[in-house]
Structure formats: C-alpha cells, structure tokens
C-alpha cells in the first residue's frame, strides 16, 4: 500500500511539472509579443538591423513556446498512462528516479535535456510492454539557436504591415549582420554543449 501511495505522489509531481511547462509557454508567448513590439519601434526609427535582431528573438520565443507546449502534452500523455497503470498496480519502482530527473531538468530550463528525460519515460513504458502511442521527439531540431533568414524577413514585413509602416525588409545591407549572428549562434551552441558536458560530469 505504501508504494502505491508513493507512486500517486510521483504522479502528482508530474502533473505539477506539466503545469509548470505550460506556465513557461505562457511566459514565452508574452516575450514573443514584447519582441514583436520592439520590431515595430525599430522599423519606425529606420533601424533595420535592430528590427532583424528583435524579429529573430520573437521567432525563437515562439519556437520555445511550442516546445514547452509539446513537452507538456507528452507529459500529460505519460501521466494518463501512469494513472491507469497505478490503478492496475503494474508500474515498477524505476519511475521515481526519472520523476526526480525530470524535475531537475525542468529547473535548468533546458528543453533538449527535458526531451531526453521524456524519452526515458517512454522507454520505461515500452519496457513494461505498455502499448501506447507517444509523440515523436522533435526537440533536437526545433531548439536550434539559428533562425531562418526568410522567417525573420517575413516576420518584420508582417509587423510593418500590421502597423501600416511603409518599409521593405529585404534590404541587402542586412547580410553583414546575418554572418555575425550565425557566428554568435555558434558560440552559444558551443557554450551550451560545454555546460551540458559539465552537468553530465557532475551527475
């Protein structure tokens, strides 16, 4: 009976984690709108390089929001399966460590890491021969730091059109910024990899 109670507590933890992911998604949505407003102000001032940077930020925040929602949805699917299995008392003890792991990775805000932990959850169910369909992980691709140039120009034009601003965003001088932006992204990715390696070493 004690272990069943413990499992129900773990399921509650997962439900809280899912709600936390949804809160993160709402936060990203607010930040996306804030960056969009900065695009408008920059275009009004004729600062096209600045507008481009804000547009990149806005798109990145939109992608983050979708990733948090996707992860929350995956977690809800796992919780529903766990609920069913708990009632049938068919869940092994190995879930506890993964619950802790997911809560730890949530604290870091690292979407890639959270997705990997979700993969572990889903593998546990496969190991227990629970036939369930889970969403495929698309985190690795969608958390990329680089933003497609066409998306950036498209968002800038969309903002300009929304506010009736007369501007053409396909400006050639923006090319110089694109190169420096990609170099910065490379540094960001290297820094992320280094921190991940440190985390693994500590763990």
Image (cartoon, grey):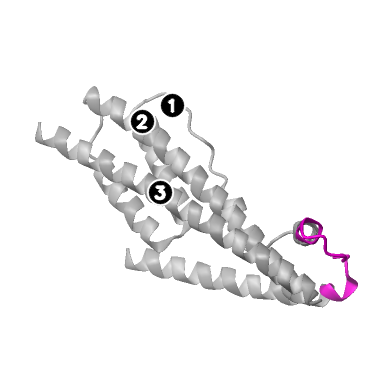
Residue 148 lies, in percent from the top left, at 74, 59
Q: CA distance from mark 1 to mark 3?
A: 17 Å
The residue singled out by tag 3 in the image is 117
Please give the name of the residue rendered at 78% of the width and 77% of the height, measured from the top-left corner. 45
Q: Relative to 10, say whether 175 is above or below.
A: below
Mark 2 lies on a secondary structure that is helix
For the C terminus, the image quarter is bottom left
Say if mark 1 contacts mark 2, CB within 8 Å.
no
The residue singled out by tag 1 in the image is 132
Mark 3 lies on a secondary structure that is helix
Q: CA distance from mark 1 to mark 2?
A: 11 Å
The residue singled out by tag 2 in the image is 80
What crowding class fits label 3: few (fewer than 14 Cα within 10 Å), some (14-19), or many (20 or more)?
A: some
Instruction: Report the front residue among 8 and 124.
Output: 8
The answer to whether residue 12 shows anywhere in this view is yes
Q: Which residues are magenta?
A: 159-174
């Amino acid at each position: 009976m004690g272990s069943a109670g413990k499992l129900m507590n773990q399921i509650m933890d997962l439900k809280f984690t899912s709600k936390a992911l949804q809160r993160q998604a709402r936060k990203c949505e607010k930040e996306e709108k804030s960056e969009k407003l900065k695009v408008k102000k920059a275009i009004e001032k004729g600062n096209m390089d600045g507008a481009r940077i804000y547009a990149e930020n806005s798109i990145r925040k939109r992608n983050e929001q979708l990733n948090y929602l996707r992860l929350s949805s995956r977690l809800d699917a796992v919780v529903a399966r766990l609920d069913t299995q708990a009632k049938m008392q068919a869940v092994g003890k190995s879930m506890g460590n993964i619950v802790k792991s997911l809560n730890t990775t949530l604290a870091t805000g690292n979407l890639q890491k959270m997705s990997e932990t979700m993969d572990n959850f889903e593998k546990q169910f496969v190991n227990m021969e629970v036939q369930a369909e889970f969403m495929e992980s698309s985190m690795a691709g969608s958390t990329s730091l680089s933003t497609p140039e066409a998306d950036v120009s498209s968002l800038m034009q969309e903002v300009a059109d929304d506010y009736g601003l007369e501007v053409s965003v396909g400006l050639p001088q923006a090319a110089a910024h694109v190169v420096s932006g990609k170099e910065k992204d490379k540094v960001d990715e290297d820094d992320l990899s280094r921190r991940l390696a440190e985390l693994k070493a500590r763990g």
